[in-house]
Structures are given as structure tokens and as C-alpha cells.
């Protein structure tokens, strides 16, 4: 049997068969029970490899995390950490509109690109390595978390404490549009907004009311108008009103800000906080939510990892461009900590967070070989 991990007998059809259960186990972040069903699936597959698996209870009404230490003579020591999330943005029932299906070189399904496909591929690479009797230079640990899609408010500390033990961090988020990896990420900040007005009967005494919805709508235009190429503002959630015949007294909203540098993030935060208002008939309260720090590119450890990955990709037969990116991931945290981190090394695809989410099937074997190569060459 071959001992070159790049040439292990990966099979796309087999991977799709295993990945199907992952995709069809819907796991939206805010449904802790659904996320935990997905953690059950992952825990089973990890245990089947002989891993020592730990279930870490969730907090804040969120799901659990799973940490798995792969079989190795030095198991438990710091080595390579595979860091991924198993929550998605798709509510339970999305499978009715976006069923798991294969069409030519594409395979569709909720969360298949972001990021169940990449997580499964890196697990499959480890399965093949163990089956071949290959001993990796460093022990490998997997950490799957439940809340990345909402900024990782609960699991961040767990991620940081676990990552600090390891020499290398692999984040199999989906590949960039050009198939490349991510070696730095922009900062992401979230904000919670609330306008509070004065209720009244919308038909009987409209003029006596002061609409919280109207004030929020005015601010939406102001906030999104602050966007430029280097710092963006997006209002993604608005909740208000229960009765159409009542002037709304409360309106809540959530805003996401992306900035390319810490300085720009600080300026964006200041602009948002300046919207606080306690005067007038309708007041605006702005509260800062979770933040993903800037992960500066070109860190020596990360660049050294990239060179290893590029050599492996060359052996496989593809190029691996790399650069900084927006979007945010848990790689922001490990990169910010200065830990060698290679992000977006998962499957290729398009349409993440939409009802057109899909992966390119031929990227399954390609990325599994990349994963196997990284496991066997990092630390060698």
C-alpha cells in the first residue's frame, strides 16, 4: 500500500455518500437541538476512527462543541488543530427547497459549502491516513464548534485556549473564488440597534404616535450610506411591530461592519456609536456586539505553512493562490493570536448562504489529498 499521502485512494462518490448525512442533518445556529444532532453525527464518525472524543456542553442557549484527539503515539500533545464549525445559516426545512442533489460536477445542499464539505474532507483524509498505517509527524486534533455563523460569542474562548496548544491551525472553510487560501482576514464587528418611540392607535390617533420603525428606516439609509471600499456597513436583521393598527414603539436591528485594518474598524465603530441618541421623540440605542479582530497577513509562520501547502498542491496538479479576505471566520482569532493559520483550504463551490449553495465535486479528492499532505508534511 502506498505511503505517499497525496496518492491515497480517495473516492469522490464515497465521500459524497458520507457527506450526505452531514448535509441532511440540518443545523442552524439558533436551534441548539438541531446543532447537537449534527454534533452527534460528527462524534460518531470521529469515534469510528478510534479518536478520543470529548463533548463540551454549550452555553448561552447554543449547541455543544466536539473535540477529538486522533490516534497517535503522542496523542494529546500540541500539533495540528483542524478548526471548523458545524452550524449553518439555513433554518430547519431548507432541504425542501435545497435538497441534497448531484448535477454533473456540482452537488447542492444547505451548508455543504460553508462548511460541512471541508470539515468532512479533512476527516476523510485522516481516515485514509489511519487506514494506510501512516504515522503523521505531529498529532492531530479536531475541534468542531456550534456558533461561528453568529460571530462565535460562546466558543471563542474554547477555540483560543485549544489553539494555543498547537503548532499549526488548519481551517477548512470554503476556498476563495479563485480556489485560493486565506492568509489574513479583515475585522468584523456586529452591532445591536434599538429605536424607541411612542405608541398610538394608527387609525384613531396616528399623529399622537412616534414610530420606531420609521426612525430605524431612516437610520438604515444613513448606516449603509457610510460604506466605502475599505469599510462596509450592512443592516441584516430588523424586527418590529405586531399590529398594523398600532404605531410601533420599539424596533430592533442588527448591523455588520467589515474593515480591512484595525484603524478602519475603530473608525467604523466610532461612527456607529455616534448614532446613539437620547433626545427627541424617538431615541436610538446602539450596542456593540461580538467582534472578529483583524488577522494581519504575511505572518512568518503562516507563510511557511503556505509554502508547504503550495508544494503539495503542485504535486497534486493545481495552483494555490493566497491572500487576505473579508467574510470572517474563526481563523481571525488564531491568526490574531499570531498562530500559524491556513484558512479557506476546504472545498471549492459557490452560493454559500443562499438557496443555490453547492460544491464542485472534483474538489473533494483534490482537497482531501491536500489535507493528507498537510497532515504528513507539517512538522516533518
Image: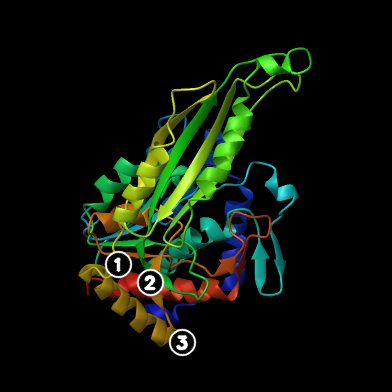
Residues at marks 2 and 1 touching, judged by CB atoms closer than 8 Å: yes
Q: Secondary structure at mark 2?
A: strand
Task: Say whether residue 338 is visible.
Answer: yes
Mark 1 or 3, closer to the camera:
1
* Residue behind mark 3: 317
Q: Which of pointers 2 and 1 lies earlier in the amino acid sequence?
A: 1
Q: Nearer the viewer, residue 13 or 314?
A: 314
Left or right of 180 in this view: 261: left
The answer for how far apart the CA atoms under marks 1 and 3 are is: 26 Å
Which of discs 3 and 2 lies nearer the camera? The answer is: 2
Q: Secondary structure at mark 1?
A: loop
Labels 1 and 3: the sequence-earlier one:
1
User: How far is the residue under mark 3 from the one under mark 2?
Assistant: 20 Å
Would you name the residue on which mark 2 appears?
323
Instruction: Classify residue 329 by image quadrant.
Output: bottom left
Residue at the image point whose x is 61% and y is 37% from the top: 217
Label 2 and label 1: CA atoms lie apart by 7 Å
Location of residue 35 in the rendering, given as x and y in whole percent from the top left corner: 53, 40
Q: Position of residue 288 (x, y in %)?
A: 39, 36
Q: Quadrant of the N terminus?
A: bottom left
Q: Is residue 68 visible?
A: no
Q: Residue at x 74, y 51 (%)?
A: 97
Judge left or right: residue 29 versus residue 294. right
**Disc 1: which residue:** 297
Give the position of the C terminus as an image quadrant: bottom left
- For mark 2, does the 10 Å Cα neighbourhood hold few (<14), some (14 to 19), or many (20 or more) residues? few
Label 3 or label 2, whichever comes before in sequence order: 3
Q: Nearer the viewer, residue 236 or 358?
A: 236
Residue 28 rendering spot, x and y as whole percentages: 57, 42
Task: Identify whether 120 is placed above or below 190.
Answer: below
Residue at 66% over, 14% down: 208
Crowding near the residue tagged with mark 3, few <14, some 14–19, many ≥20 C-alpha atoms within 10 Å: few
Amino acid at each position: 500500500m502506498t505511503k505517499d499521502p497525496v496518492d491515497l485512494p480517495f473516492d469522490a462518490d464515497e465521500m459524497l455518500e458520507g457527506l450526505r448525512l452531514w448535509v441532511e442533518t440540518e443545523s442552524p445556529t439558533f436551534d441548539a437541538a438541531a446543532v447537537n444532532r449534527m454534533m452527534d453525527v460528527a462524534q460518531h464518525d470521529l469515534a469510528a476512527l478510534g479518536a478520543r472524543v470529548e463533548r463540551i456542553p454549550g452555553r448561552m442557549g447554543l449547541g455543544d462543541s466536539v473535540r477529538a484527539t486522533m490516534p497517535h503515539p503522542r496523542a494529546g500533545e500540541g500539533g495540528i488543530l483542524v478548526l471548523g464549525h458545524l452550524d449553518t445559516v439555513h433554518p430547519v426545512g431548507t432541504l425542501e427547497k435545497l435538497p441534497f442533489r448531484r448535477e454533473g460536477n456540482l452537488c447542492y445542499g444547505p451548508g455543504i459549502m460553508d462548511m460541512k464539505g471541508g470539515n468532512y474532507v479533512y476527516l476523510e483524509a485522516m481516515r485514509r491516513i489511519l487506514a494506510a498505517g501512516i504515522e503523521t509527524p505531529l498529532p492531530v486534533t479536531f475541534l468542531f464548534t456550534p456558533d461561528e455563523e453568529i460571530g462565535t460569542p460562546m466558543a471563542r474562548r474554547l477555540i483560543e485556549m485549544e489553539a494555543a496548544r498547537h503548532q499549526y491551525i488548519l481551517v477548512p472553510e470554503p476556498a476563495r473564488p479563485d480556489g485560493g487560501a486565506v492568509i489574513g482576514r479583515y475585522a468584523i464587528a456586529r452591532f445591536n440597534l434599538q429605536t424607541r418611540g411612542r405608541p398610538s392607535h394608527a387609525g384613531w390617533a396616528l399623529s399622537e404616535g412616534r414610530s420606531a420603525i420609521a426612525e430605524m428606516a431612516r437610520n438604515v439609509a444613513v448606516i449603509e450610506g457610510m460604506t466605502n471600499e475599505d469599510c462596509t456597513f450592512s443592516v441584516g436583521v430588523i424586527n418590529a411591530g405586531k399590529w398594523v393598527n398600532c404605531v410601533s414603539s420599539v424596533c430592533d436591528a442588527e448591523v455588520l461592519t467589515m474593515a480591512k485594518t484595525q484603524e478602519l474598524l475603530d473608525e467604523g465603530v466610532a461612527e456607529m456609536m455616534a448614532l446613539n441618541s437620547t433626545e427627541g421623540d424617538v431615541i436610538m440605542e446602539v450596542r456593540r456586539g461580538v467582534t472578529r479582530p483583524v488577522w494581519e497577513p504575511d505572518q512568518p509562520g503562516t507563510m511557511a505553512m503556505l509554502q508547504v501547502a503550495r508544494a503539495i498542491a503542485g504535486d497534486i496538479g493545481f495552483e494555490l493562490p493566497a491572500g487576505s479576505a473579508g467574510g470572517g471566520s474563526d481563523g481571525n482569532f488564531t491568526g490574531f493570536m499570531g498562530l500559524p493559520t491556513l484558512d479557506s483550504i476546504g472545498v471549492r463551490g459557490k452560493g454559500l448562504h443562499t438557496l443555490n449553495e453547492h460544491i464542485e465535486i472534483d474538489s473533494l479528492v483534490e482537497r482531501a489529498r491536500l489535507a493528507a499532505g498537510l497532515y504528513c508534511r507539517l512538522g516533518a
